[in-house]
Image: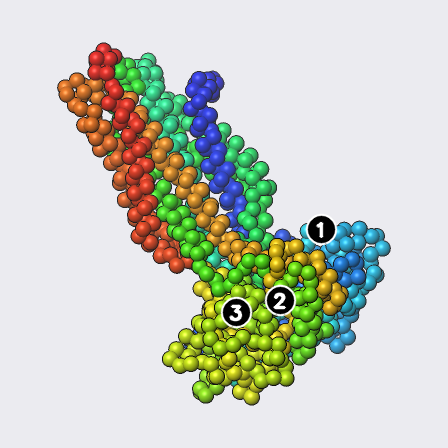
Amino acid sequence: MAFRSTIRSLIRARSLSVTIIITVALGIAALTTTFGVVNAALFRQPPFDEADRVVMLFIQRNPQGEAPRRERWSFGRFELLARSQQSFEQLASYSPAAVTLSGQSNAQLVNAERVSASYFALLRTTPLRGRFFSAAEDDPISPTPVVVISESMWAREFGRDSEILGRTIRLNGVPLTIIGIVPAGFSGLSGRSEMWIPRTMSAQITYPEYVTTNQNFISVAARLRPGVTIDAARSELAVLGANINRALPSDPENPAERVTASAVPINEARTDDNVRRSLLVLLGAVALVHLLACANVTNLLLGRATAKGRDSAVRIALGSSGGQLFSRLFSEGFTLAVVGGVVGIVLAKFASTLIAPPTNVWAPVNFYGSIAPFDSPQFGTTELLFGVTLAFTTAVLVSIPPALSAFRIDVSRGIRDGSRSLSRGGLSLRRPSARAIIVGLEAALAMVLIVAAGLLVDSFRRMQNVDIGVDPRNVLTFWVIPSEAKYPPETAHTFVSRLLDAVSRAPGVISATVDGGGPVVGAANSTLLVGGRPEPDPGQAPPVLRHYIGPDHFRTLGIPLRRGRAFTPSDDAHSPRVVIISEGAAGKFWPNEDPIGKRVWFGSGLNFNSSETSGEIIGIVADVAYSPLDRQPDYASFYTPFTQFTYPSRMVFLKTAGNPMSVVPDVRNALATVDPDVAMRDVQSLTDVIAGSRSRDRFDALLFSGFGAAALFLAASGIFTVLAYAVTTRTREFGIRIAVGATPRRVVLHVLGEGMVFPTIGLVVGTVAAIAGTRVLESSLYEVNPLEMPVFLFTGLLLFVVAVCACLIPALRATRTDPVEALRSE
């Protein structure tokens, strides 16, 4: 009976009920959907059986004078680890690679993983068809040319051919036999693989020294034995890491370096601190918006409880207790909020299938991106429980304050005066009350959100205005990743020469060049040694950026030459070695002298790597940002001709006469004439490359701008609603003021004076909270201080003006009160 009475009461107030349901639903939908994104990215286990027992292993180096750093493993170090460890039931190595699949139609780059035979057992997957690799096929002495493919590749490239097993395909020109197909949805630890090859085949397919080199580029995963804790495994690895380093030193020239090994749960290793912080800030921002929505709903319910003042007073006069009235008021608010919560959960389930962060917003940088983020949102049991808990908590929070008014009713005044006397007189915003405090809370929350939005928008604006050092207009970019087994570094320059010659002749191409990376996406690293200066201690040489480029590089990318000369076609393998440096490098390493004519060499590569093979600096060019601006790019760049040393995997840049994408078909055909087993990868304009590097900052700025706008609207509507009600309940007071001579100006100032008390207090509290809270945004800001004073001042002034405007409408309404009508109504 009581429930039916509650429903009838809510139906009679249809407009208010619908408003409350929609407000609660949108708040719960937004927060539950965001939780689903955060849960997928940070808390949900990756899609492997008992993934909480899977860990990533790494070597930890502690160079003297430097921060500790994690490294992956070499083939030899992994073999020593596998033979010595006791903590893991399975141990597997893997390394992602882009390989060219040819012979089907056009050559195409395919993501693959080079894995040990134990890889699939560790991840507890079984073949959909065929089998996986055997221990014999993992033998480095006699590698076996076999391959396992994904179910999606079987469907896309082979039409689900039932006779696929035993068929031969070509990867990087090497024939391999298909022996198995993995189940649908399995894409390995990298999260993007469509093929798996035995690691021992790497010497023929990708990297000739895969098995023999001591470089650390192989990722290692392991599964803990039953009963073994990760702390116990870490204790064993600390000892094993030191023993392995003594057998195969990471730095033979620095034998005293302390080297250990350790383990990280895969759920922790798949993300990094910046991503984690960014996602938690996002969740916090949505939670603040939901709190604002709850504050507005609470105010609406308080207004409804007040409006029913005469009814409540009559019920108590007829024998109802305060507890019974509390229950009635609580049930009305609770019912509306629960209905809103149910609608919000349904909306969140639908939104989870549609909403996902754009590409590159939270891309993984862990372990060189060798571990997938496994962060695709989905609405599962965890999200449902979160939504239900949130809906219940919200219903309780918004329903209690109006229900408590049941214990503050003055029965005699309530029967005589009705709603105006529910709380012993008209509503005053000068004294603390539930509604006044809520108004202050709304102002404080809005201040925090709008300050955060202002900082991120200012950061993105400054980033957009930064000159990264190149002219991206009409420039096409793509990668070629040929096999180093086919084109080793000693002869790679001939392949690159033929490549540039072929693509330069394609219609619409003006000039062409190559590099090992690109503006704002990264470049090769090395260390610098300068002729005539003492050689630094091992591991102490300063880091610099290395570029192996073509003679038209600076013309193609629009990089200005400041001094000296640029490279020419005559700077080849038979001419003296030459180097061009950036202005940043000149200022950093030769601050008070002329660098032109100096000689330098580097700590890596097969050339320019000793004083005997050093190069002479012949020119200085403008700085270029080779990493995203929010990562504090290093501008110390050193350029050398690719003809004097290069690797075969190159990023190609083509200056075109018009739309860069229009030349792609002709460029692809030109590349096929150089090598049909080499494909184009990541084909896009340089303008899109640069825009993509800013996608996370753009996403954050747009998202928080939306949050700020919502906060501004909710705070303004909350202040207006409360003050409008306060004016309505004090009609008699304002009528008397006007009757005894108060001017409209004095009435407006009186209403503004009362109405602005708690919003102003809220702005002060919000400013303090923003000062403390915005520091978590520091890593997401570019050249913006978290305490940027103009942003705080502008936000405070904006909210103050909005609050004044929200107060002004009810204040002007108060001046139109007819004293005679006001007194007559009493």
Of labels 2 and 1, earlier in sequence is 1
Q: Residue furthest right?
A: 163
Task: Give 354 or 309, whichever is nearer the viewer.
Answer: 354
Is residue 657 found left or right of 815 in the rendered image? right
Residue with the mark numbered 2: 512
Q: Which mark is residue 70?
A: 3
Residue with the mark numbered 1: 184
Q: Which of the image's four quarters has the C terminus?
A: top left
Q: Amino acid at mark 3?
A: Arg
Of labels 3 and 2, earlier in sequence is 3
Q: Residue furthest left?
A: 740
Of labels 3 and 1, earlier in sequence is 3
Single out the mark in the foreground, 2 or 1: 2
Proximity of marks 2 and 1: CB atoms separated by less than 8 Å: no
Circle 2 — which element?
Answer: strand
Circle 1 — which element?
Answer: loop
- Marks 3 and 2, how far apart in space? 37 Å
Q: Quadrant of residue 503?
A: bottom right
Q: How would you rate the neighbour count of disc 1 (Cα within 10 Å): few for under 14, some for 14-19, many for 20 or more?
A: few
Q: Which residue occupies 29% across, 16% down? A: 418
How far across and how far down the image is residue 402, in percent?
35, 28
Q: Amino acid at mark 2?
A: Ala
Q: Amino acid at mark 1?
A: Ala
Q: Which residue occupies 23% across, 16% down? A: 818
- Quick check: can you spot residue 298? yes
How far across and how far down the image is residue 287, in percent?
43, 42
Q: Is residue 785 above or below residue 336?
A: below
- Marks 2 and 1, how far apart in space? 41 Å
Proximity of marks 3 and 1: CB atoms separated by less than 8 Å: no
Task: Give 71 or 135, whichever is nearer the viewer.
Answer: 71
